[in-house]
Image (cartoon, coloured by chain):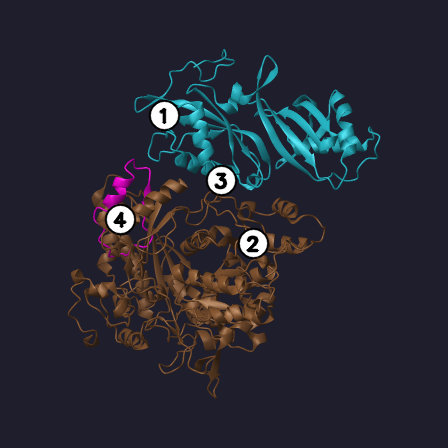
Chain colours: A cyan, B brown
Amino acid sequence: MQYEAPLRSGRRGRTPRRYRGCVLVRAIIQFEKSEPLRFIGHLDLLRATQRALRRSGLPVAYSQGFNPHMLVSFASPLPVGQAGSAELADVTLRAECSEQECLAALKRALPPGLPAARVRLVDDNHPKLMAMLRTASYLIGFDSELDARPILDAAPSFMKRESIKAVRVTKSGETPCDIKPMLHELAAFPALNALRARVSFTQAQTLKPDLLIRALMEFSKAGVGQSPALSETPRYGVIRTGLFGERFGQPIPLIDC
Amino acid sequence: MSNDGQRANVSGEPADKLIGRLLESVQKPARYIGGEVNACAPKKNAEVRVAFCFPDVYEVGMSHVGMRILYHRVHELSYASCERVFTPWIDMADAMRGAGISLFALESRQPVRSFDIVAFTMPYEMCYTNVLEMLDLAGIPIRSSDRTSDDPIVIAGGVCAFSPEPMHAFIDAFFIGDGEDGIVDIMEAVRGAKSAGSPRADIIRALGDIPGVYVPAYVSVEYNSDGSIARHMSGGGSPARIKRRLVADLDAAYFPDKQVVPYLEIVHDRVTLELFRGCTRGCRFCQAGILYRPVRERSVRTLVDQAARLIESTGYEELSLSSLSTGDYSDLEGLGCALRETFPDGRVSYSLPSLRLDSELGDSLERDARKNSVTFAPEAGTQRLRDAINKGVTHENALRAIRDSVERGVGSVKLYCMIGLPTETAEDIEGIARLVAGLNDEARRVARALGAGKKPPKLSISVAPFVPKPFTPFQWARQDSIEETEHKIATLRRMIPPKAASLHWHDPHLSRLEACFARGDRNMADVLERAWRLGCRFDGWTEQFKYGVWMKAFEQAGIDPSQYANRERSADEQLPWDFIDIGISKEYLLNEKLRADIGETTPDCRGGCRGCGLQAQCAVRSAASFGAAGQNPASI
């Protein structure tokens, strides 16, 4: 199997694990979590995936120990209510099978609301998806009944700012922060009444779409666009459209990292 | 039966979008989304569309095996479409009312009102207010008499349909008994009448001709001068008699080869096999043990075949071997071997949910299960009372079970007992505490003897007030008053130190209402409607149960609950469910009651027929291996 040169010291370089004499391989599965399955929680998704894998007949590897469980993980959990159009699962297999076979088996077994789009097989010592994750892209669609144009209009000048002060509200209180370093791309699509954003998504730095919209709303109230400012934030829905790693400062889809 | 979509709601938005918005603000939105693996695809142009309603939340209803069977049974008919509906939790129900969204089916999100048949299963009495809640959320008048030709036909079955009178005002037709074939008869009848253009009232009347169906509008009750029931009369002027339906051969009976795989974790989140229906033990408090007589087993071959299909089509890795008393299956060893052969990789685990203390399991599947907790149901604290209720287990059975638990390293043991059973005395209550102490001593002794890090399991004990149920030998008995029950609970709290076992008890107020509705007559419908109008719903959920409001409803209706719960019935009284013929003779039940009074046990009927009335249908009786052939039931 061919790989790009390692970027970091991950688990790459270690001897691959073995299971009953078989070399383990990992399947990275790109799938969609769409309407209405955006309403299921992460544990529900994990259970649904495990059951689908059992129905698929794929040679999924189990953990050793007293209560063996399937070796399945996800690049990043989605909050309940948020849809994802290119989510990633990571499944360890105990026997070789082609990417096409694997995808076909998954397409048969996954529920209709979780269609698989692509499978990439990697060595067992390939770094964990979560460790390579740097940014995530979102499509933020506003409801049509309230024109979101003032917010969309504000996006270009918002993006040009050197720094953007915002207040992050967490359980432990309110923390002022600068969100600009976490905002990598922001584009408006007036025809769709939507914004596309790519933001930081690491353990140290994560910019949530809600905070971005709140900051953008505040900014638009200051009156940059031609249209009069909105008094309240229009309702919007969020779709996570991609998860990215990084190579030479460029975003690379996580599945290809 | 109009086929309109959701009626224009407050904001004029399409219903689908509004539902999506409601889901963003409620707890557990996955309860309302459907779309699970093996869920049926709605057939838009089906001749008969059925909304199968369960009067509790999704996680409870999805665990109900009867609903699983009938959902697929109906949908597999070429001309029919079946969809599921559960009671929206309080937050969702209120949000739906606020947004003008009427109750919708999970699969198509079409309003329940637009279906031809709205079918409820009623598994316990405390779900009754939820039936009214669902009808109201659907925009269907809650009383049958207020419904018009546009409304669906509302039918109901399940264990509560055996004593249907408290619900008679709200249900157009009840189905009593095993539903696998009866539901098809109902479907055929509605299909035929619909295509012939019959009016709704005629369709409902025609349902009354189907065996097992009770149409309350065409059965009247005659009363004696003192207000007690004289008899139930059919429309034709003859005494009404509704015979329950019985599926004689479970191997031949319908059983789906798939099971909906929910996203949410439901109460019984596993594949369920029904090993057999019925029970031969004859515990005198147990309603299911009588209602589902005679015992009808599925063969090992059928069960293994069903298990293989279900495990394959669901991806579950746990299999529940369910029945009223799984240890009594005639070939548990054989079933265990066959299942291990079918699933050789050890990935499938087994649960045996109802095992008796005295079951001889030997090298059975239960040994595979690495269970950290086990449950025993001695039901009563003394041998005398266990004999009176015909539970049959002995103190030695309990001691052996606890020894076994210590040896297997079980972490906790749960005990179930009832209080307020007929013939109970103070000594029997103290007996519960003595039983706990005895089990603790034995557990400690065995743990010490075994050494090697074996610890005695933690004991917990749940006590439930006795609820007299129709069609049991105790159907005439009185229930303790709340004060009596509370006194007994206080005694147990005093006698069982927290160190010995943690004591839990079922709310006596809730048990009192269960007793009122289990043995209720037509007058209870009024109480029920008032309670629901006063805001009662989800009564089975302790934190939602409002006893004070219920008492207000009784008061408004001018009905004294103690007349239902705490009054001993005389043997010659006409009981509200006497017109339902389940095949068990009243003489048999009465005889069992008398035997309880004198503390006489009645052995398991596999050892010889006890003449309950079902001899003609009973395979247990004819089975030569039980040696029952020569016995004359009359001599017992």
In the rendered image, the residue lying farthest to the front is: B196
Front position in the image: B268 or A187: A187
In the rendered image, the residue lying farthest to the bottom is: B225
Bin the neighbour count of mark 1 within 10 Å (Cα to Cα): few under 14, some 14-19, many 20 and up. many
Q: Amino acid at mark 1?
A: Arg
Q: Which residue is mark 2?
A: B88
Q: Which residue is mark 1?
A: A94
Q: Which residue is mark 3?
A: A44
Range drawn in magenta: B335-364
Alpha carbon distance from label 3 to label 2: 20 Å
Tell me the SS state at disc 4.
Answer: helix
Label ID, residue B301: 4
Alpha carbon distance from label 3 to label 4: 34 Å
The answer to whether dots 4 and 2 both sit on one chain is yes
Which chain's residue wears label 1? A
What residue is rendered at 83% in x and 33% in y?
A227
Label ID, residue B567: none
Q: Earlier in the sequence, mark 1 or mark 3?
A: 3
Residue B160 in percent (x, y) is at 44, 66
Q: Amino acid at mark 2?
A: Pro
Bin the neighbour count of mark 4 within 10 Å (Cα to Cα): few under 14, some 14-19, many 20 and up. some
Q: Earlier in the sequence, mark 4 or mark 2?
A: 2
Front position in the image: A210 or B463: A210
Which chain's residue wears label 3? A
Alpha carbon distance from label 1 to label 3: 25 Å
